[in-house]
Image: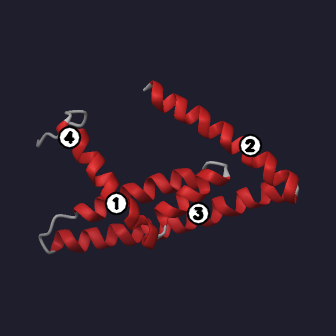
Amino acid sequence: MKIFLLIAFILSALEIGVFIWIGGWIGPWWVVGLVLLTGGVGFYLAKQQGIETWNRAQVSMQRGEAPTSYIIDGICILIGAVLLVTPGFISDIVGFLLVIPMTRKLFNQRIEKFIKYLFNKRTIIYRRW
């Protein structure tokens, strides 16, 4: 937990630094406009990709297949959407990478390995009801 707080603190400081740097380069009002624009575009893109992934998962389940890859895609889209709504340029870049289908594939295997690690470590417990 301490490492997550440290990472959050460092990322926040980096975001502020990038705001100041870009604000000095293009002006503060343009920075505000870019933050609002990336948030709006990111929200639209995340919503569209989320609905598309949900529909593909439903089709997969109707065929009797496990929608494992679609669940991982959904996790990527959710994390990306949160990052896109969060003000900041670094978070926007990572958010877009997680939401755009071509770049999202880069993260799928890593997230799947991390989830398997959490299951094996018993951090996440799965129970059937």
Q: Nearer the viewer, residue 96 or 40?
A: 96
Marks 1 and 3 in Cβ contact (< 8 Å): no
* Amino acid, disc 3: Gly
Which residue corresponds to the image point at 27% horizontal and 46% vertical from the top-left? 115
State the CA–CA distance, disc 4 to disc 1.
Answer: 17 Å
* Amino acid, disc 2: Gly
Mark 3: secondary structure: helix
Marks 2 and 4 in Cβ contact (< 8 Å): no
Which comes before the other along the chain, label 4 or label 1? 1
Q: Which residue is mark 2?
A: 17
Which comes before the other along the chain, label 1 or label 3? 3
* Amino acid, disc 4: Phe
Which picture quadrant has residue 30? bottom right
Quadrant in which the N terminus appears: top left
Colour pattern of the rendering: secondary structure
Mark 1: secondary structure: helix
Q: Position of residue 122 (x, y in %)?
A: 19, 33
Which comes before the other along the chain, label 1 or label 2? 2
Q: Which residue is mark 3?
A: 42
Mark 4: secondary structure: helix
Q: Is residue 30 above or below residue 15?
A: below
* Amino acid, disc 1: Asn
Q: Position of residue 125 (x, y in %)?
A: 19, 36
Quadrant in which the C terminus appears: top left
Q: Which residue is mark 1?
A: 108
State the CA–CA distance, disc 2 to disc 4.
Answer: 37 Å
Crowd class of label 2 (few under 14; some 14 to 19; many from 20; radius 10 Å): few
Q: Given this view, does label 3 or label 2 mark the residue nearer the observer?
A: 2
